[in-house]
Structures are given as structure tokens and as C-alpha cells.
């Protein structure tokens, strides 16, 4: 198709005019659709335009809420941004299920983040080691301008190590740095510190190392945060799981078996964890956090023992059913979108303006609740029954059903099994007056 140079310099109108005339049969219709999604509040629209680049419209996602979540004896209404039907309904159901069984308990295990200066060095390792140890304090000192505020609040750089990676890649070493970034996700802070360390490291090497000089390749945070972990759990006597005692026992056994399958079988583990991420991503998006960073870190963590495995675990011991999750979550409740996006601010207020640690616990609970709801359906009725009921509205909207058509179709499917074709047929019958 057509190429263009200088596109980013165009005004928004010019971008749309160029794009719609080049790529659409009906330029006017395409333009009108893009404009339909603009916000009439120009200030708000400008704010959204400036979140990223080459913006031409807004892309809406539903913003919903799952109420009645009891976490550590506090009740939350959890904001969730997600396009998939059934997810919020499932979370709400899980919240309600656990409410009269003591709710969820959660804690933060650790909050350590990681960044690395990756470099090569062809000289002698002991020379490099001596050089590093001699200069470590100076390397840290030269970050003080960047770290001063964070240190004042109790965070900052935790440690800086030299790591020899030459067994894996010739001449490859790292300055491996750990951070405490408190309520900030900390990406900018970490990257600024790393770039400063890299620059100091280079300068000191020029002054002090005679022969071979280290070559800095790159300095960047890691989204793998196996020491920034939240734990959430639920437990109750097996007999309390369902009304009927024998059914409850069978349910608990099948549930635990389903989790074990996800622990040893990667095909199942991926879908199992995908369900967990339905809950986690939805809260992360609503609270303005970086879901790609969390996704990448979570899946690496799920494979930390060499095989991709379940993030959750379950047990039955002495008649007690226990179900828990441990998940790496590098989250922020200050900085970034959290102070810019009005709906993110609203979401955080809905949660009682949590600290990053509290948000980690809420997000872990959302993931656990989602997994509980999915497994509960899977080992009992199957997921399609509930899922298709929720999907019904999507099908009706796809066929532009009127309110009265929707009412009739929903009534009909209260006592019939939903499938795409059966919904279409019933709708057709209504439209044909049958
Ligand atoms: C669908 O989005 C998520 C599930 O497939 C998760 C699971 O199978 O555990 C229902």
C-alpha cells in the first residue's frame, strides 16, 4: 500500500484525511466512525491524544466492577477493564461464594525489582572484580541525584552486584541491581539509575583500567520480578464448599485434581493461567498499570522450574480445602497513568487509594477468584452454560436486536441452551412474527 513520510508531523485531521482516503472505500464513513469515538470534552480528548503517538480516535473497553470482595477483612468493589463477557460475572460470583467463608486473605511476600547493565569485557575476571569492588560505592554515590527522593521515602537501590555470565555467552557480564520503588512501578526510576551507573562505570573504567575496557551493551530494568510477589488464598472445611456433603467432597477432589493437571501439563497450564490473567489484567488495566510487563513477568515465573506450570495450588488436608496463588506483580499506584487518566484515578479511589502493596494483594485475589470461578464451572457444569448466557447479549447486539427483541430472546433462553445458531434462529422467528 501507500507509504508516507512525515506522518507524525501531520495534525490529527490531516492524519485522518490521509488514512481514510488511502485505505477505505468510503472515506467519509471511516472518518465519521473515528470522530464518533472522540470525546466532546476537548480537554479530555487532548489528554487521551497525548498518551501515545499518531492517535486518531479512542478505543473503548468496558469498565466494570466486581463488588463484595472481602480481602483481609476489608470489603472492596474491584474495578475491572475487560472486553470478555463472563469475566466480571465470574469474579463477582467467586467473591460472593467466599464472603461467608471468611473471604480472601492476602499478603505481600517481597517487593524487590531488578535492573541490569549488560556489558562485555574481554579482560581478566579478577581485574574486573577488583575494579568493581573498588568502585561500587562510587557507582552508587553517582546515582544520588536520582535516588534522593526515593531514599527519603524509604526506597532506592538495594544492592549492586557484578555477575559473571561468561559460561552462557562469551565475555558477557552484568551489573545486577535490585531496587525498592515503594508505590511507584518504578520503570523510569530504575532505567535512569541504570543509565547513570553505566555511564559512571564507563568513565571509571577509562580512568582506571589499563588495557581491555568494558563495553556497555545496554541498561534496562527487567520485567521478570520473582522477588516482587503477592500471595492470596482462600480456605474452608470441605463440607462447606457445597450444600450437599458428598457433592462437596467430590467437588473438592475434582478441583484439586484440576489444579494438579495444570501443574504438570503445559497445554492445560496455559489456559488455566490465561483464566487467572483475565482477572489480573482487568484490574491492572483499570488501575493504569502496564499489563504487558505483568504478563511477561508472570509467564516467566510460571516457567521458573523449567516447565510452564500453574500459578495456583490447591490442597485438602484434615478436611480443609485450601486454594492459593503466588504471583509476581510490579505495580504502581503513583506516577505514570495513575495520576493522569481520570478513570484510573476513579478506579484507585474506588479501591480506597491503595498503596502499591495493597494493590498487589487485590490483584492477586482477582486472579485467584477468577481461577476459582473457572475451575468451579469446569469441574461441575462446564463453562459453556454460563458463558453462552453472557455471550447472548453480544450475539443480540451483533444482530442489532431492539430492546423488546432482547427481552423476548432472553426470556426464551432462560429455559433453552444458548448457541450462536439457536439465538439467530429465535431472533429471526421473532422478526418474522412467528
Ligand atoms: C476463558 O477466558 C478462561 C478459561 O478458559 C480459563 C480456564 O479454562 O481455566 C475458562
Image (cartoon, helix red, strand yellow):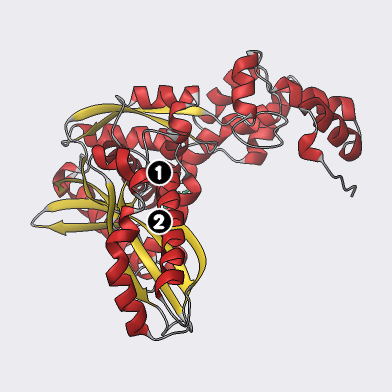
What residue appears at the point 33 percent right and 74 percent down from the top-left corner?
131
Looking at the rendered structure, the secondary structure element under dot 2 is: helix
Asked whether the beta carbons under mark 2 and mark 1 sit within 8 Å of each other, the answer is yes
Q: Mark 2 highlights which residue?
A: 298
What residue appears at the point 38 percent right and 74 percent down from the top-left corner?
306
Query: Can residue 434 be seen?
Result: no
**Count of marks placed on residues:** 2
90 lies left or right of 314: right
What residue appears at the point 78 percent right and 28 percent down from the top-left corner?
11
Against 39, residue 56 (above or below) is below
Q: Position of residue 82 (x, y in %)?
A: 51, 36
Against 300, residue 89 (above or below) is above
Q: Position of residue 130 (x, y in %)?
A: 30, 77
276 lies left or right of 10: left
Q: Residues within 10 Å of mark 1 (few under 14, many from 20)?
A: many
Nearer to the camera, 269 or 180: 180
Nearer to the camera, 261 or 269: 269
357 lies left or right of 189: left
Q: Quadrant of the C terminus?
A: top right
Q: Position of residue 221 (x, y in %)?
A: 43, 56
Q: Position of residue 144 (x, y in %)?
A: 33, 47
Label 1 C-beta lies within 8 Å of the nearest ligand 1 atom: no
What residue appears at the point 55 percent right and 25 percent down from the top-left corner?
410
| Extreme-left residue of the structure | 318
Against 123, residue 253 (above or below) is above
Between tags 2 and 1, which lies in front? 2
Looking at the rendered structure, the secondary structure element under dot 1 is: helix
Nearer to the camera, 23 or 179: 179
Q: Mark 1 highlights which residue?
A: 280
When asked about the image quadrant of residue 418, the answer is top right
| Circle number at residue 149 | none
Amino acid at each position: 500500500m501507500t507509504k508516507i513520510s512525515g506522518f507524525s508531523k501531520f495534525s490529527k485531521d490531516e492524519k485522518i484525511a490521509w488514512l481514510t482516503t488511502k485505505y477505505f472505500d468510503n472515506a467519509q464513513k471511516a472518518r465519521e466512525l473515528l470522530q464518533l469515538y472522540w470525546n466532546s470534552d476537548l480537554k479530555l480528548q487532548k489528554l487521551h491524544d497525548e498518551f501515545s503517538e499518531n492517535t486518531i480516535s479512542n478505543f473503548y473497553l468496558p469498565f466494570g466492577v466486581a463488588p463484595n470482595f472481602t480481602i483481609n477483612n476489608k470489603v472492596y468493589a474491584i474495578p475491572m477493564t475487560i472486553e470478555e463477557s463472563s469475566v466480571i460475572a465470574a469474579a463477582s460470583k467467586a467473591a460472593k461464594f467466599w464472603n461467608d467463608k471468611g473471604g480472601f486473605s492476602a499478603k505481600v511476600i517481597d517487593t524487590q525489582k531488578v535492573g541490569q547493565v549488560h556489558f562485555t569485557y574481554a579482560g581478566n575476571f579478577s581485574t574486573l572484580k577488583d575494579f568493581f569492588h573498588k568502585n561500587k560505592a562510587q557507582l552508587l554515590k553517582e546515582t544520588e541525584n536520582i535516588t534522593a527522593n526515593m531514599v527519603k521515602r524509604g526506597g532506592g537501590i538495594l544492592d549492586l552486584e557484578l555477575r559473571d555470565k561468561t559460561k552462557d555467552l562469551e565475555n558477557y557480564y552484568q551489573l545486577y541491581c535490585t531496587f525498592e520503588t515503594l508505590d511507584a512501578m518504578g520503570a523510569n526510576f530504575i532505567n535512569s539509575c541504570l543509565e547513570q551507573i553505566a555511564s559512571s562505570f564507563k568513565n571509571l573504567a577509562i580512568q582506571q583500567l589499563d588495557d581491555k575496557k568494558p563495553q556497555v551493551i545496554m541498561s534496562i530494568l527487567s520485567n521478570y520480578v520473582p522477588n516482587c510477589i503477592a500471595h492470596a488464598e482462600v480456605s474452608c472445611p470441605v463440607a462447606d464448599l457445597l450444600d450437599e456433603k458428598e457433592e462437596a467432597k467430590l467437588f473438592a477432589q475434582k478441583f484439586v485434581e484440576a489444579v494438579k493437571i495444570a501443574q504438570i501439563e503445559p497445554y492445560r497450564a496455559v489456559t488455566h493461567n490465561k483464566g487467572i490473567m483475565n482477572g489480573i489484567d482487568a484490574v491492572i488495566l483499570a488501575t493504569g498499570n502496564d499489563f504487558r510487563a505483568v504478563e511477561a513477568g508472570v509467564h516467566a515465573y510460571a516457567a521458573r522450574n523449567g516447565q510452564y506450570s500453574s500459578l495456583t495450588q490447591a490442597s485438602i488436608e484434615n478436611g480443609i480445602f485450601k486454594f492459593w496463588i503466588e504471583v509476581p506483580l510490579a505495580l504502581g499506584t503513583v506516577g505514570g497513568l495513575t495520576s493522569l487518566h481520570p478513570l484510573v484515578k476513579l478506579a484507585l479511589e474506588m479501591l480506597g487509594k491503595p498503596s502499591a502493596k495493597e494493590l498487589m494483594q487485590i490483584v492477586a485475589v482477582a486472579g485467584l477468584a477468577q481461577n476459582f470461578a473457572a475451575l468451579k464451572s469446569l469441574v461441575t457444569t462446564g463453562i459453556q452454560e454460563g458463558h453462552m448466557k453472557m455471550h447472548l447479549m453480544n450475539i443480540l447486539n451483533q444482530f442489532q436486536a431492539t430492546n423488546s427483541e432482547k427481552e423476548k430472546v432472553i426470556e426464551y433462553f432462560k429455559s433453552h441452551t444458548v448457541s450462536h445458531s439457536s439465538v439467530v434462529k429465535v431472533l429471526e422467528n421473532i422478526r418474522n412474527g412467528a
